[in-house]
Image (cartoon, grey):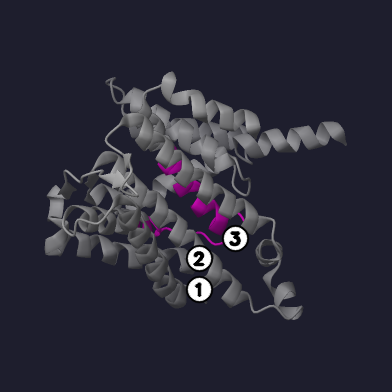
C-alpha cells in the first residue's frame, strides 16, 4: 500500500495530471459502487444519478452561488446521499433484477430532470465552472494543487470504504450477500443494513462526481445518463468485484483505453467490450480477484 501511495504521489511528474485526476475520480466512483454490489450483493443500474447529480449541484453552487470548491463538493455529496436515501427506500425491499430495474427507472427520471430544469442548461450543461481557492488558501487552477486535492479526496473515500468493509457493519453486509435468510434468522434487520450501505455508496459516488465537476470545470448530461451506470459496472467487474483494489484497477484500465483509443479510428465501445468479454472468459473473478485466488491456491 505504501508503494502504491508513493507511485500516486510521483505520478503527476511523469503522466498528464488531468488524465490522472480523471482516473482517480472514476476509481472512487467504482469503489463506491463496489461497496454496494461487491459487499452487499446489490446491483444498481442507477448510480449515474448520484454521480451526475452531484456534479450538477457542485457546478451550480460554485459557479452561480459563488461557494468555495470544498463546500460545493460537500453539497454535491450531501445531495447524492439524500437522493440515495429516497432511491433506497423505494427499491431496497426488492431483490435481483427487480431492484436493478427500479434503480434504473429512478435514475432515468433524474436524467430527464437534468435535461429539462433551467439551472442545468439542458444539453449544454454547466460550463466554465471556476476551480477557485480551496479553503481560501490553495489555488486549484494550478495542476499539481488540483491533482493532490483529488488524491486526498480519493484516499479519504477509499479509507472510508476500507474501514466500512472491515467493521462489524461490513461483516453483516457480507453475511447478507452470502445468505440473507440466515442473517434475518440471526436477528439482523437486513433492510436497514442494505439501506445504510446504499446511502453510503451514493454519498461516496457524489463525492467523486462533485470532484470531477471541479476538475473538468463542467457538468453535462453525460455524467447522468444510463451509459455511465453501465460503465461503472464494467470497471468493477473488470477489476474484480468484492475486492478493495479491483475497482481501482478496472477504472484505470477503462479510462486509459478510452483516452488512448479516442485518438484512433477504432470504435472505442467495441474494443472495450471485446476486452471485457475476454477478461470475463479468462478471469471470471476479475483481474485482481483472479490474482488473489491464485495466490491463495499456491499457499494452500
SS for dot 2: helix
Sequence-wise, the earlier of marks 1 and 2 is: 1
SS for dot 3: loop
Q: Position of residue 6 (x, y in %)?
A: 57, 28
Q: Position of residue 57 (x, y in %)?
A: 27, 59
Q: Is residue 42 magenta?
A: yes
Please tell me which residue is depicted at 52% across the width and 49% down the height of the picture.
156
On screen, residue 288 versus residue 267, left or right, reads right
Work out how far the residue at label 3 is from the one at label 2, CA to CA, in angstroms: 11 Å
35 shown above or below 196: above
Instruction: Tell me the residue that label 1 is attached to.
Output: 92
Q: Nearer the viewer, mark 3 or mark 2?
A: 2
Say if mark 3 contacts mark 2, CB within 8 Å.
no
Please tell me which residue is depicted at 75% across the width and 33% down the height of the picture.
294
The numbered mark at residue 198 is 2
Work out how far the residue at label 1 is from the one at label 3, CA to CA, in angstroms: 12 Å
Sequence-wise, the earlier of marks 3 and 2 is: 3
On screen, residue 29 versus residue 159, left or right, reads left
Instruction: Tell me the residue that label 3 is attached to.
Output: 41
Few, some or many residues within 10 Å of mark 3 (<14, 14–19, 20+): many
Can residue 235 be seen in the rendering of this structure?
Answer: yes
| Frontmost residue, 45 versus 24 | 24
Q: Nearer the viewer, mark 1 or mark 2?
A: 2
277 shown above or below 191: above
Q: Is residue 76 magenta?
A: no
Work out how far the residue at label 1 is from the one at label 2, CA to CA, in angstroms: 9 Å
Quarter-of-image position of residue 286: top right
Amino acid at each position: 500500500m505504501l508503494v502504491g501511495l508513493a507511485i500516486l504521489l510521483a505520478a503527476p511528474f511523469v503522466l498528464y495530471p488531468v488524465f490522472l485526476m480523471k482516473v482517480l475520480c472514476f476509481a472512487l466512483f467504482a469503489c463506491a459502487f463496489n461497496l454496494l454490489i461487491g459487499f452487499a450483493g446489490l446491483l444498481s443500474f442507477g448510480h449515474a444519478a448520484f454521480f451526475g447529480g452531484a456534479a450538477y449541484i457542485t457546478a451550480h453552487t460554485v459557479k452561480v452561488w459563488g461557494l468555495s470548491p470544498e463546500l460545493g463538493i460537500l453539497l454535491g455529496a450531501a445531495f447524492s446521499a439524500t437522493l440515495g436515501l429516497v432511491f433506497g427506500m423505494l427499491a431496497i425491499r426488492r431483490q435481483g433484477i427487480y431492484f436493478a430495474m427500479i434503480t434504473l427507472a429512478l435514475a432515468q427520471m433524474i436524467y430527464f430532470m437534468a435535461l429539462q430544469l433551467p439551472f442545468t442548461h439542458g444539453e449544454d450543461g454547466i460550463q466554465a465552472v471556476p476551480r477557485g481557492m480551496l479553503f481560501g488558501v490553495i489555488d486549484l487552477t494550478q495542476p499539481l494543487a488540483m491533482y493532490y486535492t483529488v488524491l486526498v479526496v480519493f484516499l479519504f473515500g477509499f479509507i472510508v470504504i476500507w474501514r466500512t468493509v472491515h467493521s462489524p457493519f461490513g461483516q453483516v453486509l457480507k453475511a447478507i450477500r452470502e445468505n440473507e435468510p440466515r442473517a434475518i434468522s440471526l436477528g439482523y434487520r437486513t433492510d436497514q443494513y442494505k439501506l445504510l450501505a446504499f446511502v453510503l455508496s451514493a454519498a461516496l459516488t457524489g463525492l467523486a462526481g462533485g470532484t470531477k465537476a471541479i476538475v473538468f470545470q463542467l457538468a453535462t448530461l453525460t455524467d447522468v445518463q444510463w451509459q455511465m451506470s453501465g460503465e461503472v459496472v464494467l470497471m468493477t467487474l473488470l477489476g474484480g468485484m468484492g475486492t478493495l483494489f479491483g475497482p481501482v484497477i478496472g477504472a484505470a484500465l477503462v479510462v486509459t483505453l478510452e483516452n488512448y483509443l479516442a485518438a484512433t479510428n477504432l470504435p472505442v465501445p467495441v474494443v472495450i467490450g471485446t476486452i471485457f468479454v475476454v477478461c470475463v472468459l479468462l478471469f471470471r473473478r476479475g483481474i485482481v480477484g483472479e490474482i488473489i485466488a491464485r495466490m491463495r491456491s499456491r499457499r494452500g
